[in-house]
Image (spheres, coloured by chain):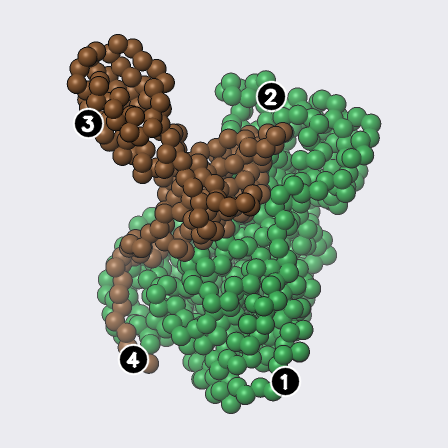
Chain colours: A brown, B green
Amino acid sequence: MAKKKKTQAQPGSAYIIQPPDPNEERHTLAVLVTNEPGVLARVIGLFSGRGYNIESLTVAPVNEDESMSRITIVTSGTPMIIEQIKNQLNRLVPVHDVHDLTEEGPFVERELAMVKVIAKSRSHERRESLRIAEIFGAKVADTTTDSFAFAMTGSPEKVMAFVDLMRALGKTEVVLSGVVAIARGSEAL
Amino acid sequence: MAVEKALTGAEVIIKALVDQGVEVVFGYPGGAVLPIYDEIFKQNSLRHILVRHEQGAVHAAEGYARSTGKVGVVLVTSGPGATNAVTGLTDALMDSIPVVCLTGQVPTHLIGNDAFQECDTTGITRPCTKHNYLVKESEALAHTMHEAFYVARSGRPGPVVVDLPKDIQFADAPYIGPEAVKPRSYIPKVKGESARIEEAIDLIANAERPVFYGGGGIINSGPNACKRFVDFVRTTGYPCTLTLMGLGAYPASDRQFLGMLGMHGTYEANLAMHGCDVMVAVGSRFDDRITGRLDAFAPGAKIIHVDIDPSSINKNVHVDVPIVGDVGHVMGQFQRCWKSRVKRRRNGKAVEGWWRQIEGWRKRNCLAYKMDDKVIKPQYALERLYELTKDQDVFMSTEVGQHQMWAAQFCKFEKPNRWMTSGGLGTMGYGLPAAIGAQIGHPKKLVIDVAGEASIMMNIQEMSTAAQHRLPVKIFILNNQYMGMVRQWQELLHGGRYSESYSAALPDFVKLAESFGAVGLRATKPSEIDDLIKEMISVDNTVIADIAVDPAENCFPMIPSGSAHNEMIMGDTGIDTGEQSVAEDGMVLV
């Protein structure tokens, strides 16, 4: 064996610090959990404690007796990190099931946006906002003479396109629900 | 579910403990757990060990659990009682030790009001427990108690906190037995997938430079699992190394054993890991103290990894054959699969060559040190301790630092559950309470805490516990007047600037022992060591043995972090102090 030159980037460090990996992937996870106090804190604490990303997180009880909740998490990481995230989630006691929708086959994602556009009555912006809303299939949820509040659902990409167009029209307020997702086909989780 | 007559919450708690087979509780009373202490007063089936600090209670429970294979139980009060337990809980989480910790809590109507001795116990302990519960309805109490034990001991074991508001302890509560509690979620897989087992056996049977790398998971799986592991390793005839947490899972005197691996592991173990073509990791987690630099870890190896915790697999190192399951089960499957699949072996010559190479590394005698007839070398003290106690069934705990690594190198363990050390968290102050816990579990056995003079000061108050319960633990202090591992790093990596690592104002340990009614012994010359050890063993009392050792001794071999397994620093290469000592090429062995 040949003598090897030492590569010690951090002399004196007790740990090995490695640069981040560029090949990160975006995954949508469906997590079925017992509906009990603290369960969301466990999931979020796992992500923050281990330095995983959360792009979006939604949660609500989903079965008839409300004993179970479904959490939809959109996260990103290298394939090794994504595997870790799933295994770590599975290890939490109130977690019943973790499904990686991105990996398990085709699925549909939807997000709800509510956008308030503030524009003077009879202004060009006001008319334009209504026209764009029509194109995107957004509904008018509220109106005053000086504003519209639109509600629009669609894929995250479509929702973002809608929001960007609305923002260009002037003063807006935006609220997004986060992503919910379901697998295509006749099988249920 | 069979519901019996209503008891009070406190009665339910005690009944649940007894039905779970608990014999000992380590604890410290306080306002929020008084009803439970009242029940303890009225009964005789549970023994309560009063500690002197809640951290000590958890470590004692860990020592008890690790040495007996049972779940350790802790009882502490709310607020400071719970926060003091946090270090112990984190330690148990990192080392996968089954512990159930009952914490008192202010009455439910006061939760969130910043009441006296209130803290958000479940919030604080969420990241440092395997799971935790806050019992808000007395109907859920019995179920929660039993589930806590199930979670603590199943799968990869760990600490579980049950937070018990005081009003729940007083309230009427229905009782159900452990048999009525079925887990709703968290059902770990114990059997390995047979296709994977076959794949693994094919790899193992055809390996040319194989190595087994076992960890604490084997010991957690039980003595039977250890036996099956040993049987399988012997069937193959391959070399075996163990992690710090795994010591005892494979008999240290066995020819196939290479010693501990990792940062302070043996030359032969680390080079075998580096050069192997098939690595069989069993119940180990590829910790950074084990792997060294990840991109240079076992470059040519196909890795088989057996673990009950899927999140341990592929976490740090890419694994070729992952097997999720309990070590005991999987080793049985390995043995059966080997018998049916491996008819003729073609790798005999290659393995013979591999062993020749390993024997060459062994001859390097990496643990050699320079003997001195005036100053006691810490390695010598431990060598003598091992020699003079090896005929007994010894239980040994350690604190954290140089002495811990030397103990791991020089004391040989033939059986599992004999070695208690804080591996993952590296908690100074672990050893004395852990020894107390082990002594409670094994009243007639010799229990030794190998300590450093700095570590022992971190939980020295537990001397009082040992005295109260007449526990004859032996505290073997390697006193080098420094936080030795800190000093070593400062010498090797920080130019010998010994910032705050000198143990100033130490107590006189002999007088300290006497003040607790224990026996204090001291040795300052190598010639005194044997007599000291013999006396220490023969005394039927707690003993503090203060061994004045060489303050400048360093622990080798050492893989500096950021280095690979084949870049060990050895003890006999004549390291001098100064900035260049590590960077210099001559220090870096290949």
Secondary element under disc 4, as helix, strand or loop, is loop
**Cα separation between marks 1 and 3:** 75 Å
- What residue is shown at x 65% (from left), y 41% (from top)? B184
- What residue is shown at x 54% (from left), y 40% (from top)? A32
Secondary element under disc 1, as helix, strand or loop, is loop
Q: Amino acid at mark 4?
A: Ala
Q: Amino acid at mark 3?
A: Ala
**Cα separation between marks 4 and 3:** 63 Å
Q: What residue occupies the far right of the structure in this picture? A: B5
Res B309 → quadrant? bottom right
- Asked if residue A33 can be seen in this view, the reply is yes
- For label 3, the residue is A168
Decide: few, some or many residues near mark 4? Use Cα within 10 Å; few <14, some 14-19, many ≥20.
Answer: few
- For label 2, the residue is B108
Circles 1 and 4: CB atoms closer than 8 Å = no
- For label 1, the residue is B343
- What residue is shown at x 55% (from left), y 63% (from top)? B323
Q: Nearer the viewer, mark 2 or mark 3?
A: 3
Have a look at marks 4 and 3 and say if they share a chain. yes
Q: Is residue B70 above or below residue B115?
A: below
- For label 4, the residue is A2
| Among the two numbered marks 4 and 3 on one chain, the one whose residue lies closer to the N terminus | 4
- What residue is shown at x 57% (from left), y 59% (from top)? B324
Q: Chain of mark 2?
A: B
Q: Amino acid at mark 2?
A: Thr
